[in-house]
Amino acid sequence: MEIIKNWSGSMVFTPGQVFEPESEEQVCQLVKQAHSENKKIRVAGAGHSSSPLIKTEDYLLSQRHFRGVEDPDPETNRATVPVGMTVKEAGKDLFRYGLAMHNTGDVDVQTLAGAIGTGTHGTGVELPNLSNMLYGVKMVTGTGEIVELSRETDEEAMRALQVSLGSCGIFLKMRLQLEPVYQLYRREYCVSLKDCMDNLEDLKKNRNFDFYWYPRTDLCKIRIMNTEKDKMPEIPYGSLELEKEGPSHEILPRSRHIKFDEMEYILPQEKAIDCFFEVRKQVKEKFRREVAWRILVRTIKQDDAFISPMSDRESVTISLHHNAGLEFWDYFRAIEPIFLKYGGRPHWGKKHTQKAESLKEMYPHWNKFQQVRQKYDPQNTFLTPYMNELLISAE
Ligand SMILES: Cc1cc2nc3c(=O)[nH]c(=O)nc-3n(C[C@H](O)[C@H](O)[C@H](O)COP(=O)(O)OP(=O)(O)OC[C@H]3O[C@@H](n4cnc5c(N)ncnc54)[C@H](O)[C@@H]3O)c2cc1C
């Protein structure tokens, strides 16, 4: 029996069996086998989600053998990425072909399939989440058939598959819309919260901008990236902490050595600053002693994927970090109602307490998503008890 743990160690389970198929045919066979034995099957990436998306008592699949970028096309800036590749591996491989992703999250150790599956995002008002790269997909459906779809052949299905939490099919290969390689300049400054807020509109004009607020000191770390050096702003009110430049795939992500648990909500941008100040007030009043760590605020461009947390609205994300190993639910549960009050939608891969009943109300295209999900997984082979609570129990 293999015990599976997520990165922070707060989500632990023992699947019935773990498989590492080496061919597309084997994936089909495993899904058919699960289906005929009335078992559920979940596909895992790098296990960096802390919500129990991949938790199962039946079959768990790793696709680590599916690697190596294929069919790079410099005219359309598209390439095919097999699903076992991490963001880091894909970034390096694509670079060799003169291609790059428009953004990454804070780290690059997730699989690209897992990151796309939950709508993982970086920061930048003009930059949508990573799932927006998904142009086409080859996948195994819940009945074990291989299908290939693209935005050209089936736009509606792609809007469902873009962020689909492994609930519509097991992806084998992803055709991605990329960009020609580009250079990034990165600077990080320490500033006061007041200066950060007074200059927010200017700071948001940078290609990538986000800030960490540190509850104990009331200081912020701002992080800025641009493609041209002369676009890097002077920040006379801040002290420079870090300066770097290089190809985008090396500059966007950072390494994380201190493990943490996280709750992140995605808010309509016009409500986010009021929400941030209400969260800050609560943290200062009730959690200043317990919460030694920071709160991260990022901006994301809207998209039109049916259950992307950024769908149909320009978004700002606020995330609570709490050191791994410490009790985090008291803190997260106390702040979550504030996020909800301001119209927040939870990050699918992080801690939250939402279920289908409330999620359904947050997503105007929920029913369209369900139609596509039912089409590709008619027997609910991918729906474990958690996935059922998350996606179905309201129906
Ligand atoms: C240290 C750390 C930093 C992070 N930083 C960010 C950040 O900056 N921004 C952000 O938005 N999030 C961030 N996250 C969250 C993380 O990006 C997501 O949880 C992501 O989904 C994890 O990817 P994974 O490869 O570990 O996939 P998993 O967590 O294993 O799986 C995620 C989902 O993808 C599905 N999936 C995986 N492979 C396939 C496939 N082949 N076919 C179909 N479905 C599949 C799974 O079934 C599951 O539903 C961070 C998490 C950690 C631990």
Image (cartoon, helix red, strand yellow):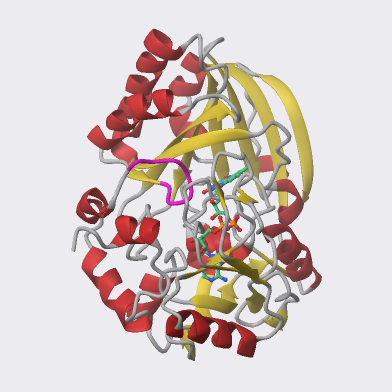
Residues rendered magenta in the picture: 347-353
Residue 36 or residue 198, whichever sits in front:
36
* Residue in the picture at 55% in, 87% down: 28
Image: 198 above or below 9: above
Name the image quarter holding the N terminus: bottom right
Residue 104, magenta (yes or no) = no
Task: Return the x and y of residue 224 as percentages of the image width and height.
Answer: 62, 37
Q: Is residue 203 left or right of residue 186?
A: left
Residue 96: quarter of image: bottom right
Any part of residue 151 in sight: no
The percent position of residue 203, horizontal first and vertical second, equals: 52, 33
Q: Count of labels shown?
A: 0
Provide residue 133's location: percent of width, then percent of height. Answer: 53, 68
**How would you classify the magenta stretch by its main secondary structure?**
loop
Against 307, is 239 above or below? above
Residue 191 can be seen, yes or no: yes
Quarter of the C terminus within the rendering: bottom left
Image quarter where ligand 1 lies: bottom right
Judge by depth and name the residue closer to the eye, 79 or 319: 319
Left/right of residue 151 with respect to residue 88 in the rendered view:
left
The quadrant in which residue 186 appears is top right
Residue 117 % position (x, y)? 49, 63
Q: Residue at x 70, y 34 (%)?
A: 187
The residue positioned 37% from the left and 59% from the top of the image is: 385
Q: Is residue 70 above or below residue 227?
A: below
